[in-house]
Amino acid sequence: MTDDVDHPRLRRLLGGPELARLRQRLRGKLLRDGGGRLTMSQASDLERATVERLVGRPPRQGKSLSVELEVLSHALARAGVSTDLQSALEALDGPLVDRRTVREEARRRWDELLDAYRPEAERLGASGWLADLRRGGQLKRLAGGSEERGARLLEQALSVLERLPAQGLTLSTLAAECLGDAHALDAGQPVSALVRRALARYWRGGVALEHPDERSTWAHAGVLLGGDITSAVLTLRLPVRGESDADAALGHYHRLAEPTWLTLRQLLRRPPEWDVAGHRVFVCENPAVLAEAAERLGTGCAPLVTTWGRPGAAVLTLLEQLEAVGAVLHYHGDFDWPGISIANALLARFAMRPWRMAAEDLKSHAHLEGKPLEGRAQEAAWDPQLRAALERRGRALHEEQLIETLLHDLRLPPERQLSG
């Protein structure tokens, strides 16, 4: 549209940095409304004089400027400067681009790209993840705005999800198998970010942490980072029914009623055959409870697991295994804000029942002292009265203070104390 423009005259009439604001307002009016009247309440003397000279209007007093774009366009054409106003503005500052239209068109193309992979994502149980990518724009950011790269990243991520769960496969082996590069799923890699987001929030229920660490996220899918012997879970009296050497060892400790450490490597490489279908398994936050149960209840203790504070990868993996074979999980933690946060996350992820974690349980121990509450107050998802009760108390109530009550619940009836 700029072939019939007298560039030297146009630059003298409407060019230069002093008139950049005027040109920008004219461009915006054209893009927004296609024409009409432009009004500037605080126009400069130069801006006002330029418009008046172009349209052949005598100078006016004041600071405001008002002009019909069609009049200005005809004036430029009559003067032989440009065929119309749009051609003049494009010759001076480049093509008029409706950024909103461009954004909407780009959004439409990315939506179409994601829609193309919806059937596969639904088949893999990851449709929520795909919807999240649409809302948050993560795929577009990781792809640097390239739709071609975005499609490639999405295909790679889905190929990894297709391979999961992996029974104790290392991350590098998984990456080599699925993507042909042992480091393609390392932290910082775009495909890794996509897959971890799917695992953490959507794939098979997600991970029971608000911000899961990398080890817990991959463990949720049966994948090991390195040897994974540093993540472990402390247990007591968890029964097994398998005949492998590992199950035999666990069975021995079960009969002895000795606390047993299980590493993430053990849980994923050779998952025990847990014999807990339909049985209650208690989960506590503090290892002191488990230690006291082993000491005082021995073989008369119900199966018990401790999270040792906020649960790590081994704890979450064990709870997933126990739930998968039909264990009835019960959870108790500290009556403080971090304790409620942990309980909220676990009860949201697992079919887990609160264990003496109600406001009434807190009130029944009002005589016990405790440290002042610290941190941000938390609503308890399982009991809307608990937050208010804890705020009125103003002090924490930790599990160690409730040992007698918890041990009473953990004691098995005599007929079950031999077999557990």
Image (cartoon, rainbow, N blue to C red):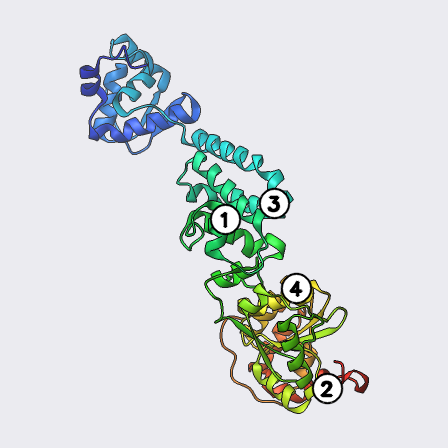
How packed mark 2 is, by other alpha carbons closer than 10 Å (few <14, some 14-19, many 20 or more), is many
Q: Distance between the residues labelled 1 and 4?
A: 31 Å
Q: Looking at the image, tell me whether mark 2 or mark 3 is earlier in sequence order.
A: 3
Q: Position of residue 245 (x, y in %)?
A: 63, 73
Q: Name the residue under label 3.
A: 127
Q: What residue type is labelled 3?
A: Ser
Q: How far apart are marks 3 and 4 (CA)?
A: 20 Å
Viewer-closest of 94 and 194: 194
Helix, strand or loop at mark 2: helix
Q: Mark 1 points at which residue?
A: 177
Question: Does residue 138 lie above or below 344 as drawn?
Answer: above
Q: Mark 2 points at which residue?
A: 300
Q: Which of marks 1 and 2 is in front?
A: 1
Q: Name the residue under label 4.
A: 350
- Do the numbered discs 1 and 3 sit on residues whose CB atoms are within 8 Å? no
Q: Residue 145 carries which label?
A: none
Q: Looking at the image, tell me whether mark 1 or mark 3 is earlier in sequence order.
A: 3
Q: How far apart are marks 2 and 3 (CA)?
A: 46 Å
